[in-house]
DNA sequence: AATTCCAGAGAACAGTTGTTAACTGGATGA
DNA sequence: TCATCCAGTTAACAACTGTTCTCTGGAATT
């Protein structure tokens, strides 16, 4: 399927990825709107002008980071919502998956949480678009559930957005707890579990 | 009670407020971590060095902005939660209050949403502390409600955090809809209302 | 009336930024 | 093999940054 890249294209992609990685690392202690192009190239070890071969601006790089951070996340979200088992099992499993993802890609999670309401408009827009996609996917999965019988499309989408926002809040809490003692992580797990449980209860009695 | 300020102190506070206002305006299109001290003083019309008479750094100014933006909000939150009437009336009233607040202080709301997960640690910390206070106040109000009978303290605080987060999400949605056609505002109102309603239902059946 | 205080001004500092133009040298395709 | 391409380099630019030190003029204090 995928054509083998030439030495040239391969090297270019390597540099591009290095720029993305360096930027992501630098963004742990600042926002995208204060990230300088020279700062990034310096971290990678290339000339400042090389930056322009890959991105028009740091905002452009930010949009690419959104795709990297959220693009690969869709499969996880889908499986999280659609896993079998009773309600309680699914909640536990969902939160566990979030915790694992934060462990595996903390910088990605931080970037999304930070730039979702950040100072760079195109990046905010890109994140918003991806989150809308997530909500639509979650809605599609919810619709398959027998519990969704009698629900209007609007209400399903409303619930899906509630889940997506809750997912982000929980991820952000796990992120803050990353370098904290494990008891703090346990506290977050308990909190998120019960919040999700309450939403689940509300869902169950929505049509009363 | 309050001693009348001398000409000197009054003028100083005036300049200080001008710096805060200018910074807040500049932060509509960028994040705090990219806000320069010279940028702020230029907007006010004072020398760059005058900045140091009021703030140690822009991060310090940011913390002051947190107090300005959230400090005056506590009364509103309390009355929002404690208003009388049945569940549905309270939800409508709460969302209306949020919408009004966003209309009245859009820059404040934007600042909080942006810097809650922003790149400046002391500011994040200040916002987090204030939100914890909000949650505790909400919890105290919830505890007065007869519906809270049988609830543990932990569960009440869990619910309070859910409400506070939901409040912020809703405020952020109204902010995005500020310059959109009124039908978009209506859509946000409907969405937020139903989400709050679902949470309310979950609350009602929590002890089942 | 004389003295102290202090918010703000002014000038200068070394260091940083984004962007331009012209270049080099190795991969690419004829 | 030779001409073309193009990712990355080098050098230079005007503009900007935070921070320092010294100074000033009017308010506050005695």
Image: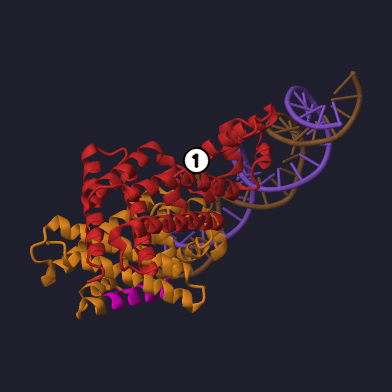
Chain colours: A orange, B red, C brown, D purple
Residue A159 forms part of the magenta stretch: no
Q: How many numbered callouts? A: 1
x and y percent of residue B201 in the render? 21, 61
User: Position of B144 compared to B22: left or right?
Assistant: left
User: Position of A108 compared to A35: left or right?
Assistant: left
Residue A17 in view here = no
Name the residue at the left extreme.
A150
Residue B111 in view here = yes
Quarter placement of the C terminus of chain B: bottom left
User: Position of A55 compared to A94: left or right?
Assistant: right
Quarter of the view holding residue B145 = bottom left
A104 w.r.t. A163: above or below:
below
Q: Which residue lies under the disc numbered 1?
A: B24
Quarter placement of the N terminus of chain B: top right
The residue nearer to you, when weighing A146 against D6, is A146
x and y percent of residue B109 in the render? 41, 45
B3 w.r.t. B115: above or below:
above
The residue nearer to you, when weighing B19 against A203, is A203
Which chain letter goes with mark 1? B
x and y percent of residue A66 in the render? 37, 60
Q: Residue shown at 41%/60% (left/top)?
A: A113
B77 w.r.t. A21: above or below:
above
x and y percent of residue B101 in the render? 37, 41
Q: Secondary structure at mark 1?
A: helix
Q: Residue shown at 54%/58% (left/top)?
A: B121
**What segment carries the magenta color?**
A91-105
């Amino acid at each position: 399927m995928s054509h083998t890249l030439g030495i040239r294209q391969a090297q270019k992609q390597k540099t591009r990825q290095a720029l993305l990685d360096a930027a992501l690392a630098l963004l742990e202690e600042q926002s995208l709107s204060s990230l300088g192009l020279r700062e990034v190239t310096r971290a990678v070890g290339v000339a400042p002008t090389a930056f322009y071969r890959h991105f028009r601006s740091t905002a452009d790089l930010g949009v690419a980071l959104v795709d990297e951070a959220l693009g690969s996340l869709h499969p996880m979200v889908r499986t999280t919502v659609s896993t079998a088992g009773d309600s309680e099992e699914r909640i536990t499993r969902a939160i566990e998956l979030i915790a694992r993802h934060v462990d595996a890609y903390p910088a990605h999670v931080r970037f999304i949480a930070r730039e979702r309401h950040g100072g760079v408009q195109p990046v905010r827009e890109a994140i918003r678009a991806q989150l809308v996609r997530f909500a639509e996917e979650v809605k599609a999965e919810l619709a398959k559930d027998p519990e969704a019988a009698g629900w209007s499309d609007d209400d399903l989408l409303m619930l899906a957005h509630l889940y997506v926002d809750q997912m982000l809040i929980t991820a952000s809490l796990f992120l803050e707890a990353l370098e904290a003692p494990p008891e703090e992580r346990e506290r977050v797990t308990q909190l998120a579990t019960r919040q999700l449980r309450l939403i689940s209860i509300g869902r169950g009695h929505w049509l009363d």
